[in-house]
Image (spheres, rainbow, N blue to C red):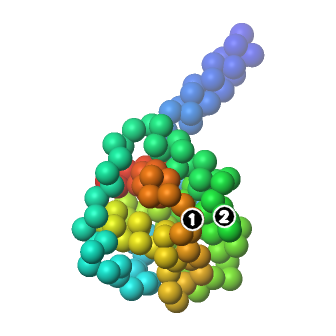
Amino acid sequence: MKFIISALIFALIFFQNMTVSNSWAMNKKDLGDCPQQRNIAAAPSVYINKVNPLRNEPRHIKKGKVLSHIKAKPLACKHCHGLSGNGKGSMSASMNPKPRNFICKETMDEISDGQLFWVIKNGANGAAMPAYPYLSDKKTWQLIHYIRSLSNSNS
């Protein structure tokens, strides 16, 4: 009888822990710097007001994720921005300014799609962000959908 009660208590605790939200389960350190101050110049005005022309669909987000985690060259985004997008990738410790924290909704709501497009294509002067000019516009917009999905920010 004690075994059954112990097993039920364990199951209840396990189930409760599995159903808590991700944001509750993450500690403050995992969230990265939030909000994060802008640390690069604004894109030219012709880019600032650009809006992602692709529908916000799972297929575009998935393709953006593959770019972020594997295919982007010269370096996959995860190395600086982290797997979760919190700006704490394996190479971020020595960087100043720190990589953008994509999971911070407050920060990401302040950045237009056009600004993200410009920075991905041209890099960020004064930061370690390299340029990815070889990415097609479609792939760049898919990457932006993935980045936005990390904070559910759809500017």
Q: Is residue 93 left or right of residue 25?
A: right
- Look at 57% across and 27% down and name the residue there: 15
Out of 131 and 79, give the one closest to the viewer: 131
Out of 155 and 131, give the one closest to the viewer: 131
Per the image, label 1 sits on a secondary structure element best described as: loop
The amino acid sitting under disc 2 is Lys
Rendered-image quadrant of the C terminus? bottom left
Residue 10 image offset from top left, x and y in percent: 66, 26
Q: Is residue 83 left or right of residue 111?
A: right
Residue 69 image offset from top left, x and y in percent: 64, 53
Is there any visible trace of residue 151 in the rendered image?
A: no
Is there any visible trace of residue 37 in the rendered image?
A: yes
Q: Nearer the viewer, mark 2 or mark 1?
A: 1
The amino acid sitting under disc 1 is Tyr
Q: Which residue is mark 1?
A: 134
Residue 64 image offset from top left, x and y in percent: 52, 50
Q: Specify the farthest residue to the right.
A: 3
Residue 33 image offset from top left, x and y in percent: 49, 72
Cβ atoms under marks 2 and 1 closer than 8 Å: yes
Q: Vertically, is 20 above or below 10? A: below
- Look at 63% across and 82% down and name the residue there: 95
Q: Vertically, is 101 above or below 4? A: below
Q: Which residue is mark 2?
A: 73
